[in-house]
Every structure is written in C-alpha cells, then in structure tokens.
Image: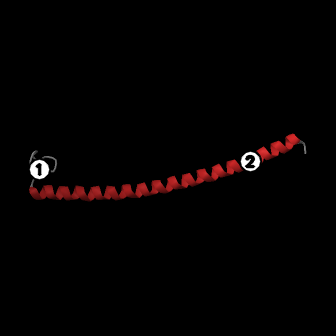
C-alpha cells in the first residue's frame, strides 16, 4: 500500500467514525425532541380539558345568576 493510500484509508476511517458519532447524537436529539413533543401534547390535552371544565362552570354560574357571562357589568371586581 502506498503512503497516499494509507493516508486516504486513515482519513476515511476517521470520517466514518465521526459520521457514526454524529448520527448517534442526532438520533438521540430526535428522540429527546419526540419525547418533549409527547409531553407537551399531553399537557396541552390536560389544559384543554381544564378550560372546558372552567367554561362549563362559568356557564352554570351565569345561568344561576341569571346573566350572561359575557355581559357582566364592569367595575364590580369580577
């Protein structure tokens, strides 16, 4: 094997190792992002359900008070 072939072989091995490390790192980052999106989606669902419950409570309270929840008088600390 000539000196040039040896240099090229070493360079190729070094680049191959670097590529594998970067691929592994990117795969780990993608997985971390996927898990983060999954957690945010679950949190979003929980917040949506909470908003729906609160909306129902506001509607029932408005019906109980005999007024519209959107037509409250202003300046009464509500």
The numbered mark at residue 66 is none
Q: Whole-percent x and y of residue 34?
A: 50, 54
Q: Mark 2 or mark 1: which comes first in sequence?
A: 2
Q: Whole-percent x and y of residue 22?
A: 64, 49
Q: Tell me which residue sits at (28%, 55%) in the image.
A: 51
Name the one closer to the observer, 60 or 3. Answer: 3
Quadrant assignment, res 66 = bottom left
Q: Tell me which residue sits at (59%, 53%) in the image.
A: 27
Name the one closer to the observer, 7 or 70. Answer: 7
> Dot 2 corresponds to which residue?
14
Name the one closer to the observer, 37 or 17. Answer: 17
Q: Disc 2 versus disc 1: distance between alpha carbons?
A: 70 Å
> Dot 1 corresponds to which residue?
77
Q: Whole-percent x and y of residue 73?
A: 9, 46
SS under mark 1 = loop
Quadrant assignment, res 62 = bottom left
Instruction: Name the front one of labels 2 and 1.
Output: 2
Q: Whole-percent x and y of residue 48?
A: 32, 55
Q: Tell me which residue sits at (33%, 56%) in the image.
A: 47
Name the one closer to the observer, 28 or 7. Answer: 7
């Amino acid at each position: 094997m000539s000196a040039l072939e040896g240099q090229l072989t070493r360079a190729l091995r070094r680049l191959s190792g670097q590529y594998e490390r970067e691929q592994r790192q990117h795969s780990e980052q993608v997985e971390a992002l996927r898990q983060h999106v999954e957690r945010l989606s679950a949190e979003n669902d929980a917040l949506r359900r909470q908003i729906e419950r609160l909306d129902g409570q506001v509607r029932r309270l408005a019906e109980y008070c005999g007024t519209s929840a959107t037509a409250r008088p202003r300046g009464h600390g509500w």
